[in-house]
């Protein structure tokens, strides 16, 4: 049902729905205070972050995930850095590899669905689960972002799942 809702929402409508979500994120106290932010370059059925990433890369240290094997690496994204299509068609930064997780102030995380407790349902491959487990070792605030129709009463969880601190 969630996948159908995401795919039946027209691209222009998803873009319109993305604006208020990203405006809320942009004025969030954790975002305004953050110097280094992990964002993501959206897939067509997600909150559209493409312009948001470009805009904020002029003002903050922006990190983007890149799929490498079964894991996610983080790469800096700065104006002028290239983007290339990764193994799942996601635009990934060609900027320098980033490993100083302790300096990340905020992580903005996508998901298929989120519940009121911040639990996140991913796409099933575990890429973000493994990344979030590494990030959780540091005091990084995590915000999930999604469309309203992606909020559900309950997301099934397992012991390794890491909830978001907040969902917008």
Image (spheres, helix red, strand yellow):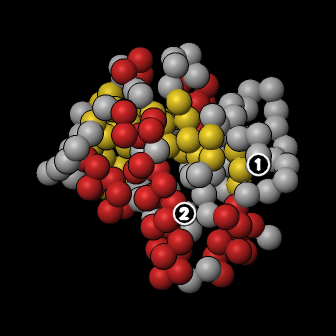
Q: Quadrant of residue 152?
A: bottom right
Disc 1 vs disc 2: which is toward the camera? 1
Q: Quadrant of residue 70?
A: top right
Residue 37 in the image: state x and y as whole percent: 38, 37
Give the residue drawn at x 40%, y 27%: 104
Residue 29 in the image: state x and y as whole percent: 44, 38
Residue 109 in the image: state x and y as whole percent: 54, 44
Residue designated by label 2: 46
Rounded to the nearest angstrom, the CA distance separating label 1 from label 2 is: 17 Å
Q: Is residue 81 left or right of residue 136?
A: left
Question: Looking at the rendered structure, which numbered label has been put on residue 76?
Answer: none
Give the residue drawn at x 42%, y 49%: 27
Could you tell me which secondary element the residue under label 2 belongs to? Answer: loop
Give the residue drawn at x 82%, y 33%: 158
Question: Looking at the rendered structure, which numbered label has been put on residue 115?
Answer: 1
Q: Nearer the viewer, residue 27 or 162?
A: 27
Count of labels shown?
A: 2
Q: Is residue 106 left or right of residue 160?
A: left
Q: Quadrant of residue 94?
A: top left
Could you tell me which secondary element the residue under label 1 belongs to? Answer: loop
């Amino acid at each position: 049902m969630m996948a159908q809702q995401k795919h039946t929402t027209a691209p222009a409508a998803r873009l319109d729905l993305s604006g208020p979500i990203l405006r809320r994120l942009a004025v969030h106290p954790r975002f305004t205070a953050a110097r280094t932010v992990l964002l993501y370059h959206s897939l067509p059925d997600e909150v559209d972050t493409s312009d948001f990433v470009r805009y904020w890369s002029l003002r903050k240290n922006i990190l983007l995930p890149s799929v490498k094997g079964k894991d996610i690496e983080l790469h800096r994204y700065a104006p002028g850095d290239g983007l290339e299509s990764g193994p799942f068609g996601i635009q990934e930064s060609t900027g320098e590899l980033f490993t100083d997780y302790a300096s990340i102030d905020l992580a903005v995380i996508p998901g298929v669905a989120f519940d009121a407790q911040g639990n996140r349902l991913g796409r099933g491959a575990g890429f973000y689960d493994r990344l979030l487990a590494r990030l959780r070792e540091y005091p990084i605030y995590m915000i999930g972002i999604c469309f309203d129709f992606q909020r559900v009463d309950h997301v099934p969880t397992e012991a390794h799942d890491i909830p978001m601190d907040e969902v917008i």
